[in-house]
Image (cartoon, grey):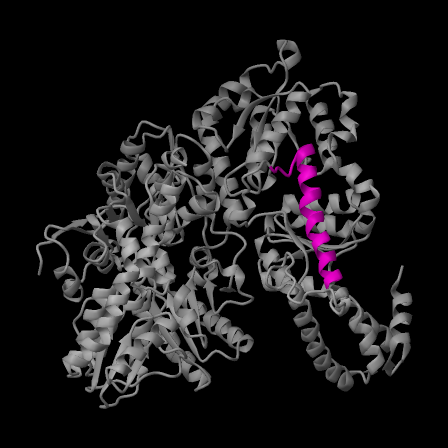
Amino acid sequence: MSGSTLLKETGPREVFCGLTSIVWLHRRMPDAFFLVVGSRTCAHLIQSAAGVMIFAEPRFGTAILEERDLAGLADAHEELDRVVKDLLRRRPEIRTLFLVGSCPSEVIKIDLSRAAERLNTQFNGQVTVLNYSGSGIETTFTQGEDGALKSLVPLLPSSKEEQLLLVGTLANPVEDRLKTIFKRLGIKKVESFPPRQSTQLPSIGPGTKVLLVQPYLTDTARELKNRGAEILQAPFPLGAEGSKLWIEAAAKAFKINQTLVDSTLSPLVTRAKKALQPYVDQLAGRKLFLLPESQLEIPLARFLNNECGMELIEVGVPYLNREMMKPDLELLPDKTRIVEGQHVEKQLDRVRTSNPDLVVCGMGLANPLEAEGISTKWSIEMVFSPIHGIDQASDLAELFARPLHRKNLLSPKNLETF
Amino acid sequence: MELTLWTYEGPPHIGAMRIASSMKGLHYVLHAPQGDTYADLLFTMIERRGTRPPVTYTTFQARDLGGDTAELVKGHIHEAVERFKPEALLVGESCTAELIQDQPGSLAKGMGLNLPIVSLELPAYSKKENWGASETFYQLVRGILKDISEDFSNQPKTTWKEEGRRPRVNLLGPTLLGFRCRDDVLEIQKILGEHGIDVNVIAPLGSAPSDLLRLPKADANVCLYPEIAETTCTWLERNFNIPFTKTIPIGVKATQDFLKELHDLLNLETSSSLNNESQSKLPWYSKSVDSNYLTGKRVFIFGDGTHVLAAARIAKEELGFEVVGIGTYSREMARKIRTAAKELELEALITNDYLEVEEAIKDTAPELVLGTQMERHSAKRLGIPCAVISTPMHVQDVPARYSPQMGWEGANVIFDDWVHPLMMGLEEHLIGMFRHDFEFTDGHQSHLGHLGGHSSQAEISNKEIEFSESENKSNNDQNIHWTTEGKAELAKIPFFVRGKVRRNTEKYAQQAGCKEINGETLLDAKAHFSK
């Protein structure tokens, strides 16, 4: 492991909770519905994060707990059954229903696994009911996806067949592209988890080699390992170099001839570097401060430093899984300051005194920092944009170059020159 | 348990945040888990605020629950007071913290801090955002003024005339994330100035807790948004003998009524300019021949209480529209809306379910929808013009330009905002009419963007599908059949009223015992239903 400086901080945090993952999960699996068992706050959070109004009827909703649900848990279960029945009558196309635990449902201890079991019996095959927690007292932001995927693992059929399994939500075009590359390398069976339809689950077993696409799937990875799969160690597929190492990890596991790997990937990397160059010119030497939110911070810092030449002031992460992050951590420069957890006020003090050129942060903090003259990039954009893979490296860099470019365009100095 | 896909109002602590963020020198310590901080983005993104809301979230986690969360709360309160040095502190909890019963307010009061502390109890499982804002404002004003109120009641009250000064009023209720509050305040201030009335305190927007100490110096309160300020105004009336206005100055007539009411409350002679309509362009624009086509436009109104009531009056009395539907998501305003609905011979729609609102819009087939951001989306899906008149809102409802709803300028803004989408609607209709002319370019883009001319076509084919489905149904149910000619005539009717015409015609045919609907039946039905 490299000589990063690992620090821990506690205090007031400014991060989304795991419910936010529903925003992209429901798009990945259009035949699934996510029903949060929670409060009006949960409903308000998801609609605020997702811009829900564009949907006629979204495939997620909240069963809002009311005072009488708090008074008696037996009634709460009855009520939940009623809500689920109404919902499924209205949306007969739903094949998988996720009951998503929230802070209030966890605190009053509504047993959603029991509810799921009961509802599975009632709906006998018409729909599969699963449960996981996206509560803020246990999960941050992207961890919700970990919970959802983990709940699906027991449903995966067993198979000893040799295959590569890509784990974590990807944008569909990016997924297709990555699969094409693996096919070129001669890996015959490449599957994705989560699948595009909740019912088309990939198989799992001793022949399965897993490449994690996203860095926040700790529990899912553990469950897949328990089912006999091998989890391949690699940096996460962000940037040309990172994605190359990630693909190579699979190639090595499948014993692909190195000449084929080189001849397949080298032209892609060369092209990606060429596309990346204009952004490298804008980003190199600029100071970057990442606030904790999406858990993508370490791979992003690695990309922006190694491939774009940015200087890392601080890399904040909501939590640090050293084993999973090891390949990325090893590629970070010595003495990179990594801070796990958050004291948002103290961290913002450090942002101000370190005078960064760019801060990666949540939407709640972006405008206030911009108003202080500090350029920002919202981290939530990373989970919505197709950023994975060698071919996407320049698009990823562009996301960070754009705020700097814009600041330059609008700066008074620039106006004077013209 | 209530299934909610989308909610008009947030939980009550969001209301408290609106009060805290609107004011200066006030800080809110909110006992809440991680994730509840999403609320910051409402202010920094929708309102484009360049400052963070003055809120410290305790962001407790599951592992804290086994230990001493009370100590955690105290630590955060201590740090917040130290760092932000507020004049006063609000202390409260969100839905989850309410369940663990740490009583953060009592904890704060026991810490021996040297500043006013207002403990908020906002029941998250029964109340909503506007109630939370109202309650917070009331508790804050009461908390700041409670010591004075006893002294005050012993003093004889002197009038502005006796004191030889101009009358002065407080403007109460404007908040962040309210609808156009920033500009309403400027407009009302300007109008009051023209009538020789001074503004004493504007709260909560822009004031500090220390400013609230001056509230009792006003001769009257102007209650701009009853959802937020009525409780406070009532308390100030009871304890300080300050009367308050009940009329909301949205629309020309309501602005005139408001000024009349305020003059009476202040015992101020009304000037002749009060009824001078030329102060707003709305009356003339509405009278001008171009506005003839506005006559009897069918309008559906839904939103909070205040803006819906005002919109109904403007629609009917100032623009000559026909109100065909009215409702609110605000339970607190339900009674007032029901009364207004009764006067319009309508049934009020009181609901928090946007799908129910969308159904009601479909059923009434209006030509214009006045609603919230959600009705804008519903109307867009239905291909009906819409103007946003109420919260909840989108970033585009916080315009850069001066655009109040209240007062004379507010009436101008309303005329433009409501009539422009209608003109666009008309354009949409013309596109439909001229689609077959050879000069017409297919794919013409109108205000509905990608939905443009194309969509009307899609719309028509959709309706035709809908038609044939329901035709089968009516065949089974009522034995009524549309002839090919009847269908062709129906297709010529603009899409936004076609559904209504079809239903009316079928209803007429059934009443008249017709088994077959042709072009003549359509005309018969039209004559039958015309008033």
Q: Residue at x 69, y 79 (%)?
A: B465
Residue situated furthest front in the rendering? A418
**Where does residue A298 sit, x and y in percent of width and height?**
21, 58
- Magenta-highlighted residues: B403-431
Whether A191 is drawn above or below B369: the answer is below
Whether A196 is drawn above or below B528: the answer is below
Q: Is residue A324 found left or right of B354 in the rendered image?
A: left
Q: Is residue B17 found left or right of A155 in the rendered image?
A: right
Is residue A322 visible to the viewer in this orientation of the structure?
yes
Q: How many circles with numbers are drawn on the protein?
A: 0
Whether B501 is drawn above or below A355: the answer is below
**Where does residue B186 sit, x and y in percent of width and height?**
59, 30
Q: Is residue B500 found left or right of B362 in the rendered image?
A: right
**Where does residue A133 sit, x and y in percent of width and height?**
33, 66
- Foreground residue, B143 or B10? B10
Which quarter of the rendering shows the N terminus of chain A?
bottom left
Q: Magenta stretch containing residue A239, yes or no?
A: no
Examine the image and state in which quarter residue A189 appears.
bottom left
Q: Is residue A232 found left or right of A23 in the rendered image?
A: left
Examine the image and state in which quarter residue B243 appears.
top right
- Foreground residue, A29 or A43? A29
Which quarter of the rendering shows the C terminus of chain A?
top left
Q: Residue at x 44, y 44 (%)?
A: B43
Q: Residue at x 53, y 74 (%)?
A: A86
Residue situated furthest bottom in the rendering? A160
- Foreground residue, B289 or A51? B289
Examine the image and state in which quarter residue B274 appears.
top right
**Where does residue B487 sit, x and y in percent of width and height?**
80, 78
Q: Give the main secondary structure, helix, strand or loop, of the magenta stretch.
A: helix
Is residue A16 visible to the viewer in this orientation of the structure?
no
